[in-house]
Image (cartoon, coloured by chain):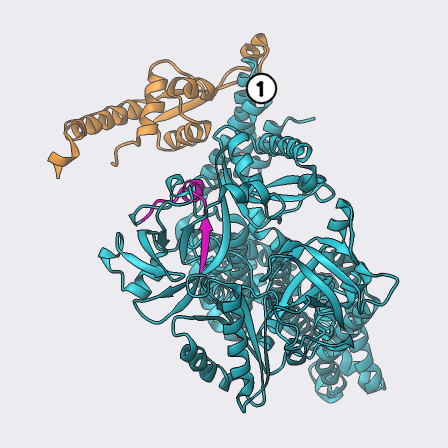
Amino acid sequence: MRPLSISACSVLQALVAGARYGFDVIDRTGLPSGTVYPALSRLERDGCVASAWESAEDAHAEGRPARRYYRVTAPGVQALGAATRHYQSLLPALARPARERA
Amino acid sequence: MRSVAETIVHLAAWLVPGDLRADWLREWRAELAGCRGRGWTERQLAMRSVGAWAHAVWLRADRWRWDVIWQDIKYAARFLQKRPGFTLVAVLSLAVGIGANAAIFGAVRAVLLRPLPFPEPDRLVKLATTSLDKPDSRRGTSSPPDFVDWRRDVDAFESLAAISADAAALTGDGPAEQVPSADVTGDFFAVLGVAPLYGRTITPEDDPVGTPDVVVLSHSLWRRRWGGRADLVGSTIMVDGKPTLVAGVMPEGFAYPLDSQLWLPLRFTARELETQRGAQYLDVIGRLRRGVVFDQAAASLRRYAAHLAELYPRYNEKRTVALNPMRDAMVGDVRPALLIMLAAVGFVLLIVCVNVANLALTGALGRQRELAVRTALGAGRGRLARGLLVESGLLAAIGGASGLLVALWGTRLIAALDAGVDIPLLDQTRLDLPVAAFTVVASALSAVLFGTLPAWHAAQRLDIMRGIKADAGSTVGDRDRQRLRGGLIVLEAALSVVLLIGAGLLMRSFLGLTAVDLGFDPSRIQTFNLSLPPTTYPTPASRAIRVEGLISEIAARADVEAAAAISGLPLSDYNYTISTSTIDGRTLDRDDQMRRSMQVRVVTAEYFRVMGIPMLEGRTFQPADGSGAPPVIVVNRAAAAVLWPDTAPLGRSMTLGTRLGQGGGPAGGTVIGLVDNVHDRGPGAPSRPTVYLAHAQFPVEFISVVAKARGETTELIEPLRKLVAAQDASLPLFRVRTMDQLAREAVAQPRMFLLLLGIFAAAAVLLAAIGIYGVMAHAVSQRTREIGLRLALGADRGVVARMVIGQALTLAMLGLTLGLALGAGASRLMRGLLFGVEPFDPVTFAVAAAGFVVVALAASATPAIRAARVDPADALRSL
């Protein structure tokens, strides 16, 4: 499987770190909404995250619309791990100046 | 009411696949609510909501089955291949429509949009001295003392420079030649922010009088005359007869202003700065100080101008300084004309799209059966509609790609237009990335425009049973579809009528311009300019002798009817205005002096005869009117009306507010002749009051020779060159032109705009005719059986033909009415382009209307004849 994109990794990591819904993820990652939401949809399509709607009572009690909560699935945790290892393997190469690489 | 952010989200919702839409909307509402909870501004909310579009697009694209879309593309390609006629017409008209749009956009971009080729061009401005009653003028030259005062005292500018466009004679190192040049003050290159390729530019250190003579060369001149010699910088060349140090060479492409080929220091003597406050001949440009707002600078400049007016009321009273962005100052006048052309060519593309939509709609009708069968076999309507959209997309892509070729050719054509058209920066038109991007956008837009309607139609109104039975035939075509197509025709007709009216108005003004009697006869007149350098011709007398000698030798030739010289040819943008100082010995007050300003020309005796300017009263100059004789003048009718409104001018006298000539006395004299007016600024501008001085009495350095040929004008120039060279080999001839050429150039711009709009209008009318023909032919073929039945039942063939034509005319008339109404609105925008014709010109409107009706009739004739020739037997058999 192709490793996740950097932005997908950031989104997953934000979820792992405790973010639960879109607004939260945007806040933690600093990514634009036009990146975060498609990434969430894509991760959900690929089975890396699952989503569920907050109960109407909870939302009502807080006086706001219900949120869609996302959580990382087991395959999502695996994919994040694989992607993190992949990007880490690139780091030494990136750390060297370009001249040496050439 | 919904906020902006919510509206953005709701609009995006349309893209989201239906089954996801409700959840999607809930999620985004929650998102916005979260933002609001933090007290975000509407602006921040709107920024956040833009992400909803990215999300929606992603969700939609994720659903697309690319294999199916690929299938659609293959299917569309096959379909287009099978209908080569339709495809060819559609692609060609799209290519022309899109390409023409891109080419005109390229011109608009070059002239109006692309930043000037200087660093931080937004800070570049032009300063124009103007009168208080025309404070917004873009043109206006300034005097050296004013310029020096601004430079010293107005601190809105980082730097200011004065320019005096000129021409310089190059001698030595090859044949003598005259090239366009500019005398510039030390900050000129700093204002523009252009560094030299080699050596140095002119700097403030070159400003003081008495510093060494230096010259900066253009890249092209350096390459052409000196073969790009690297060691030229630092060596000495002959400029205007003086040894001059080559200080530097500019990079390729730099030729500001007006195609200058070399730059010399512009220096002011102390005496000039003392006495020349009235001599307004400098173009002044400046670079705004960083952080200074344009309006601020303009205001402080105006304040300073008022201050100068108080200090020097004699010259500066009622004068102010207008500040303009440099581009506006360069191209301001052609902006409306170019935008009108862009709108017109946009109309043409719209008509092309309407036409292709119409053709495609015919296609959709013919394919009813196929579409119905596919529906019956389970194809969704959305899928069918998408198939049709893919077809349009494919057509538009091919049309756009071909349009790119048309654009490439069109931009080159525009860039290569005759320099006589005189639109600054137009030669910079090219097919660059933004123009290519414009082409892509225009193509995509066209696809949407002409593809949506047929697709929507296919999706909405598909009656499977009727579709499958389509072959069995119905007696009446689907009325809705006919109505839709009729509506398209009306739109097309209206747009082409608008273009016809526009072209008609330009045609009328152009005819008006060319019908103007210029006041002289430009035929068979060869002209060239001479500049007599003070080094060789130090005294006025020596100049007079040289010019008189040349003229008499030229006039003596067998192939020359007459020859003369003048200090500024008509139609050559020459301007030499001097105030009138005295009339009949009476000194005028200051206002009166200005009000009675005169154009001043110095001529030799035969000038009026060569040009065919009628001598109304008195006589022209004679040999006796020489340097020792009392000064005499000839005035034109306009000058006589200004100077002596109530009496005959002959025998009266006047003097001008300048001293030129041999004796050093004020120019002017006793009137010995009255000549007719000449339209010296082109047929569209009124004649100016002009005073003609005798060259023998007031010889000038810079003169234009005019020679009337007995035979072909073109055969005259080589002998004249030799003749001049024989007298003084270092005297270059320049600006070699015929008067006919000047007369043509005077109307080159209106001619070009007429030609463009004429082409657009012709294309529009042709397309509209094709549209009408297509709709009527289709209607007739759909109704063959019905018509056959009517004929069998005894209908008259003439009635059938009239019915078809009547239908076509109804559409045409509706379009015409709409077009006339639109035209009445649109033509008012053209007022600035018109000469001698009102925007709402009844003749033009009537002719455009009549012309369009004729075209509509012609377009419907063939279908009408075909309808009348339907064989009732055939029709009945097929029932």
Q: Residue furthest right?
A: B646
Q: In the image, is residue B326 above or below residue B674?
A: above
Q: Quadrant of the N terminus of chain B?
A: top right
Q: Chain B rendered in what hue?
A: cyan
Q: Residue furthest top?
A: A61
Nearest the camera: B187 or B207? B207
Residue A55 is at least partly visible in this image: yes
Percent x, y for residue A35?
Answer: 42, 30
Q: Quadrant of the C terminus of chain B?
A: bottom right
Does residue B205 appear left or right of residue B567 in this picture? left
Q: Report the residue at 75% width, 45% height from top.
A: B590
Instruction: Tell which of B410 and B764 is nearer to you.
Output: B410
Q: Is residue B527 left or right of residue B537?
A: right
Q: Residues within 10 Å of mark 1 (few under 14, many from 20)?
A: few
Write down the quadrant of residue B851 in the picture. Answer: bottom right
Pick the residue in front: B562 or B125.
B562
Q: Amino acid at mark 1?
A: Thr
Percent of width and height locating residue B358: 64, 65
Instruction: Name the residue located 78 percent from the left edge and 49 percent from the top edge.
Output: B588
| B136 up-or-down from B421: above or below | above
B653 relative to B555 in the view: left or right: right
- The answer to whether residue B584 is above or below residue B6 is below
Q: Which residue is mark 1?
A: B41
Pointer 1 chain: B
Q: Position of residue B735 (x, y in %)?
A: 50, 69
Q: Residue extending furthest left? A: A100
Query: What residue range appears in magenta?
Result: B180-196
Q: Quadrant of residue B784?
A: bottom right
Kindly tell me whether residue B368 is visible in this rendering.
no
Q: Callout 1: helix, strand or loop?
A: loop
> Residue at point 43% right, 78% down?
B727
Q: Colour of chain A?
A: orange
